[in-house]
Image (cartoon, grey):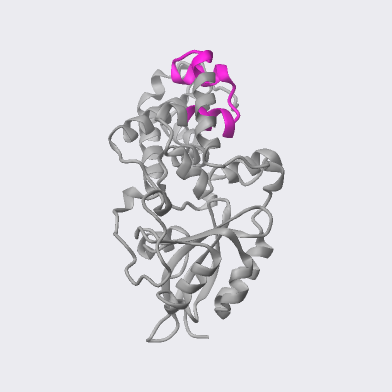
Amino acid sequence: MTQAISSPAAGVDAPDVGVLLERYRRELTGYCYRMLGGAADADDAVQETMLRAWRAYDRFEGRSSVRSWLYRIATNVCFDALGSAKRRERPMGIGAAQPAEIENFGETLAEERWVEPVPDDAVLPREGDPADMAIGRESVRLAFVAALQHLPPRQRAVLVLREVLRWSAAETAALLDTTVASVNSALQRARATLGSKNLSRDTERWGEVDEELLGRYLDAFERYDLEALVRLLHDDAVLNMPPYTLWVSGPHEIARWMAGPGKGCLGSRCLRVHANGSMAFGQYRVDADGGWTPWGLVVLEDDGAGRVTGITTFLDTATWFPRFGLPDHLPAR
């Protein structure tokens, strides 16, 4: 836990308060992102947290650390947001898989319905204990964040605080104004829900992003060698493209889709990015006027053993490319 500071009576002027609060922006953004499932929603929640903390700082009595105090505020902000929001989902949680030859991409849903991608640099620490870093990366993967959205808000907060941030049961109970027994019960129920979604993994297998697998995938994809791509896919791999409800399941169905409705991806170029603790890249399709134009932000999920389990392409390039620092056009070679 971060060392507590003395109360404002000891003398902390407004600019110093701002600098102090900013130290916690990244970890608070990670917490709010896991709670809310949306990158913009997390930004808004952290901004509201900072504003409330700034306004209330002269009443902060130093009984807890500044970090604990900020997490209490952020939790309340998230609870307020979740009270009126629909649950964010992924296409696989909305309907059945569709055949590869289908030309219709399915229904288009509003952005607030989807679990969104987030840059690693916005939510994950740059250094720390390797085991904690691995847990941090695993806990922002799309599948995990989507599963969290199925938990009631308080269970969600308990699981993130206890399992991801490593708060004690007593610290978590104090933050939520409840008992240790209640925290332990909520954690048990949350674990059971996540366990039913087959999300338990050996964190020792989850180190850095598998750059070698990503390199092989990008090589096959840019050559549009579908046979090579199939060899990289897990038997249960899925392809999906928010904001459309379409999703395709299985390596051969994915290859059929790429050869059919997705054939416009032939000749694409890709730039690597860091998203959701996973393999990721910006995809650019051939521009008829020359060069390549943005098509989608792609997040690849894997099984930790060298196979891709999920291909998620977020098609709102006007939102995602600037957020990930990707150029709006690639010139001809």
How far across and how far down the image is residue 43, in percent? 40, 44
Of residues 18 and 142, the one nearer the viewer is 142
Instruction: Indicate whether 148 appears above or below 277.
Output: above
* Residue that appears at 47% across and 51% down: 118
Tell me if residue 329 can be seen. no
Tell me if residue 128 can be seen. yes
**Number of disc labels:** 0
* Residue that appears at 40% across and 75% down: 261
How far across and how far down the image is residue 22, in percent? 48, 38
Instruction: Indicate whether 152 appears above or below 326.
Output: above
* Residue that appears at 54% across and 31% down: 191
- The residues colored magenta run 157-183
Of residues 117 and 91, the one nearer the viewer is 91
Query: Is residue 175 magenta-colored?
Result: yes
113 sits to left or right of 312: left
Query: Is residue 160 magenta-colored?
Result: yes
The quadrant of the image that shows the N terminus is top right
Q: Main secondary structure of the magenta part?
A: helix
How far across and how far down the image is residue 124, in percent? 56, 45
